[in-house]
Every structure is written in C-alpha cells, then in structure tokens.
Image (cartoon, rainbow, N blue to C red):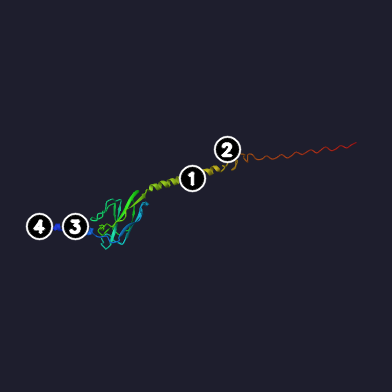
Amino acid sequence: MPLLRMALPCLALALLAAAVQAQAARPTPKGAMVYIMYPEDGATVKGPFLCRFGLRNMGVAPAGHDFPNTGHHHLLIDTKEEINPDEPIPHDKNHLHFGAGETETRLDLPPGKHTLQLVLGDGNHYSFTPPLISKKITITVRDDSDDDRVKTRSRHRSHHRTHRAHSDRHHAEPKPTKDGPEGCGFWGWLKGCQDPVSTAAKPTAEPSAVPAPPAASAVP
C-alpha cells in the first residue's frame, strides 16, 4: 500500500510530462506563414498607431479552441529571447496575447525605435513546432512634442510675416494731418514737401491798362 501511494504521484507527473511533450510537439502546417501587414519594416509612425496581422495557409481561432490548422496571434515587442516551444508563450507587456482572435490592434509606444514580431500560438498558448514566427521589423515612433515645436515655429513665422506686412503698409500710406488727408505734415515740410493746402497758388494780378497815346495836335 505505501508503495502504491508513492507510485501514483510519479504516474501523474509522467502523464503530465507526456501531455506537455505532446502539446509542444504540435507540428506547424505545411506552407503556413505569419507576418506583419502594417506598419512596414523601417517605417516612422505617430502613436497611437494601427498594427495589422497577416496569416497564410492557416485560420484564426480564439484561445481555448483546438480546431485543426488554427491558432491565435501573439505580438512580441522589443524582445530578444527566443520562444521556447516547450513552454506557453509569456503574457506580459512585451508579449501581447490576442486570445479573442483579433487580427489587428492599436499600439501606443513611447517615442524611439521598437521591434515588432508575431508568433502564432495554439488554443493553449503554446507555439507550434517549429515556431510559426514572423520576420522581426523595426519601427520608429515619432515624438509628438517635435510636431508641437514645428507648429509653434510656424505660427511665430506667420505672425511675424503678418506683422511685417502690416508695418510696411502702415509706413507706405500717408498719414492724415491737420491740413487734410494728403497734407505733408511736419516731417514732410522738413523734406521740402509742398502742402497743396498751405501753398495754394496765388491769383495772378490782372495786367494794368496801357495808356492810350496822346492825340495829335492840329497844325496851324
């Protein structure tokens, strides 16, 4: 009886190990391929941005469903370690699970360079053998503050151009004076301007009558 009690736990561990080995040994279907549709490798994006998943020669099914030739997506962000087919795919901020069968997501990553990679898992979050994994791409997330600085500089430049044009127009137009809208004013008078009001033409004097020549006297 004591021997039987010792044998039961050993048998349970053996069955569990066999189940894990069988799970890890699930083969990758022939011709299957997983890839990132968007963004493209080397792209510069502004967050939050859309990330779309692609899958060929397989179907997508939610986690917990073990349909043949199906799986669900897992997105690896800035990871360096290899996927271990003997263990479930990790679930953390660098390993995003899409167990509902999603084929796209919206990512909000900090500014800078990041790597993205897809791996397809089965209904129990194990990878296939060999792992069905996409090409790792590198993207750059643009800093929103850079756009704000560019917009601020653009507004300042536009304001400066508007102010300068208004100033030029202000100096170009003659200012009205006490003598009228077209008067010279004080500064114009210093420059020799002739005020049309103050320098009105004087009336020309009428020519004086020429006296008639004296009449000739009669000869005696």
Mark 3 is on which residue type? Answer: Ala
Decide: few, some or many residues near mark 4? Use Cα within 10 Å; few <14, some 14-19, many ≥20: few
Q: Position of residue 167 (x, y in %)?
A: 51, 43
Instruction: In this rendered view, identify the residue nearer to me: 105 or 38.
Output: 38
CA gap between label 2 and label 4 equals 121 Å
Q: Which residue is mark 3?
A: 17
Badge nearest the viewer, 3 or 1: 3
Q: Earlier in the sequence, mark 2 or mark 1?
A: 1
Q: Which residue is mark 2?
A: 187
Q: Is residue 150 left or right of residue 55?
A: right
Badge nearest the viewer, 2 or 1: 1
Badge nearest the viewer, 1 or 4: 4
Mark 4 is on which residue type? Answer: Leu
CA gap between label 3 and label 1 equals 76 Å
Q: Earlier in the sequence, mark 3 or mark 2?
A: 3
Residue 173, relative to residue 61: is it above or below? Answer: above
Say which mark, if any, is on residue 3. Answer: 4
Q: Secondary structure at mark 1?
A: helix
